[in-house]
Image (cartoon, rainbow, N blue to C red):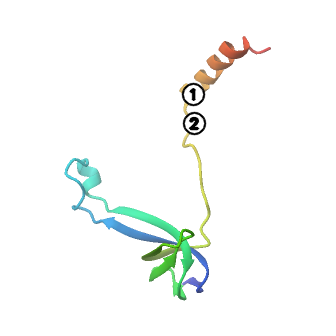
Amino acid sequence: MKTAKKGDWVQIEEIVLPAGHRAPQVPEDTQKCDLKLWVKGVLQADAELGDEVEIKTVTGRTAKGTLCEINPRYVHDYGNFQPELLQVELQLKEILFGGDE
């Protein structure tokens, strides 16, 4: 089991609303899932992955949850390729620049 030390940058997971306690207008398949929150911050005491821990965020807020990652990455992307957007790009270039030239 991986151990994190007090002062490590970590990510926790917290269940905000358990399955079955979601808003009534939420679709049925979504009702069956927990609403989760992930927060990054500085660990306040040594712990292992899966332990309930307390962190302090960069804004100074204290949060409690399940330790799920040590030194978490920042991952951003724009999803899967959308062929329609390629056509929009080509049309936009034609409008703005008059073609391939």
Residue 6: mark in rendering: none
Image quadrant in which the N terminus is located: bottom right
Residue at coordinates 58% horizontally, 22% vertically from top-left? Answer: 88
Residue at coordinates 28% horizontally, 66% vertically from top-left? Answer: 18
Residue at coordinates 55% horizontally, 40% vertically from top-left? Answer: 80
Q: Which residue is mark 1?
A: 85
Outermost residue to the bottom: 46
Q: Is residue 27 left or right of residue 68?
A: left
Image quadrant in which the C terminus is located: top right
Q: Is residue 57 left or right of residue 26?
A: right
Q: Residues within 10 Å of mark 2 (few under 14, many from 20)?
A: few
Q: Secondary structure at mark 2?
A: loop
Q: Residues within 10 Å of mark 1 (few under 14, many from 20)?
A: few
In the figure, 65 relative to 17: above or below? below
| Residue in front for this viewpoint, 16 or 99 | 16
Residue at coordinates 55% horizontally, 72% vertically from top-left? Answer: 41
Q: Amino acid at mark 1?
A: Leu
Residue 21 at what x, y percent from top left?
A: 22, 62
Q: Which residue is mark 2?
A: 81
